[in-house]
Amino acid sequence: MGARRARAFDDVVVALAQRCDTAEGARAVGGAVVESLRAATTGAWERGWQPADVHRMAVRGLGADEQVVVLDVMADELDRYASTTVDPQWWSQLETLQGAVWWPRSQTWLDARRRRGADWLTLLTQALTVLHLLQTLPGIERLSPLPGTATAAPQAAAGGAGRAGSAPAHVDSRILERVRMLLAKAESTTFAAEAETFTAGAQALMARHSIDLALLSAREPDAGEGPRGRRIGIETPYDGPKASLLTAVATANHCRMVWTRALGFGTVVGFEGDLESVELLFTSLLVQANTRMLAEGSREDHRGRSRTRAFRSSFLTAYAHRIGERLREVMDAETDAAVSAAGPQGQALVPLLAARTEEVEATVGEWFPSVRTKSTGSVRDAEGWHVGRAAADRASLDGAGARAGLGRRRRG
């Protein structure tokens, strides 16, 4: 059946390419293909997909050339809307993926590619492959307004915020940049103790920023928004332990994660500043965990059979478990410090954070009414568990060392 469909697909592409031998035929075919892709992209948005989600599916199932076409198609569709009516996160996702309208607006992206020398057969094969992907994407939870229906936050509108790259309202971009710098240092150092200290410093910064945002929303109810969602890729191999790590990071930062294993992502629900923290920290910790795991090399049992897969799965599971404990320790320490420093106002902080957590839980219940709690896998290798736990436990995350390191960097 698959071979029959492939032959039918080839026949359609060849027939369309032959129609493009004339200028009139090329205009008709090209126009129909572009409009079909626009409609299919709009349909994907309506079924809950965002630019990063669509691209993730393209990476999972399509070749490199088709992945670039996906970016052109999404940029083309989003370009039809006023920038202020598209959620800033969508522009940010597209910019991160390096997607943009690079062709003159007097042309379509398909015409522009043709003028660069691509032949019709290749162009149509790529375009129809992308069309099939877009049309077959299943429905998922809609996490943000559809393009054309979003409203700009007052600060963004007043400040003339651009399409992409700007931090969400009330998320301090300076804090995020310092967090990125700390995590980059954690990823680059060859010393585990240094990596843990940098990571602890990043978590402490993010914890304090989360507390500040919570206090701001309490003082100025109109300053904050409700919980939002962000999908983060969780790829194989070892997707179960990686999901555990994302859950640990999300929980430590007042968020909740729901794993959609079949589609390769986890949806993190929380307030915007916390979502930024979770994505940054999870990405960095995954890099650090993989680096340490690979440094351990392969493993064999007493009969010479490979047990590397079981070792690595257990390593990552233990790593996620212990990292979660340590991140929560840092968050608790920062919360206690904030309560002490804030005086009378600080007494309201703990119930305030609890209320925000309840709001997150309510949003999860609304978006995922049938979500189930499920184990992400068992530990099958004792050595992997102990080595993974040790990898996450080599340096103190008590916050004091992290704050001292931050102080030295500020003075420097």
Image (cartoon, rainbow, N blue to C red):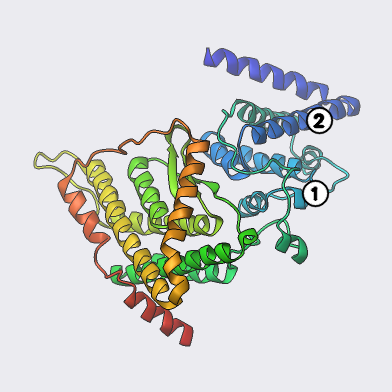
Question: Which is more toward the observer, 71 or 182?
Answer: 182
Total numbered labels placed on residues in the image: 2
Q: Can residue 188 be seen in this view?
A: no
Q: Name the residue under label 1.
A: 82
Point out which mark residue 35 bears: none
Q: Can residue 102 be seen in this view?
A: yes
Residue sitting at 65 percent across and 19 percent down? 9
Residue sitting at 51 percent across and 54 percent down? 275
Q: Name the residue under label 2.
A: 30
Query: Tag 2: residue type?
Result: Gly
- For the residue carrying disc 2, how many other residues have a C-alpha within 10 Å: few (<14), some (14-19), or many (20+)? many
Residue sitting at 85 percent across and 46 percent down? 105
Relative to 367, 25 lies left or right: right
Query: Tag 1: residue type?
Result: Ala
Q: Where is residue 114 in the image (x, y as percent from the top left)?
A: 78, 38
Q: Where is residue 143 in the image (x, y as percent from the top left)?
A: 59, 42
Question: Which is more toward the observer, 408 or 66?
Answer: 408
Relative to 276, 239 lies left or right: left
Q: Which of marks 2 and 1 is nearer the N terminus?
A: 2
Q: Where is residue 45 in the image (x, y as percent from the top left)?
A: 66, 36
Question: Which is more toward the observer, 114 or 361?
Answer: 361
Cα–Cα span, label 2 and label 1: 25 Å
Question: Which is more toward the observer, 303 or 355?
Answer: 355
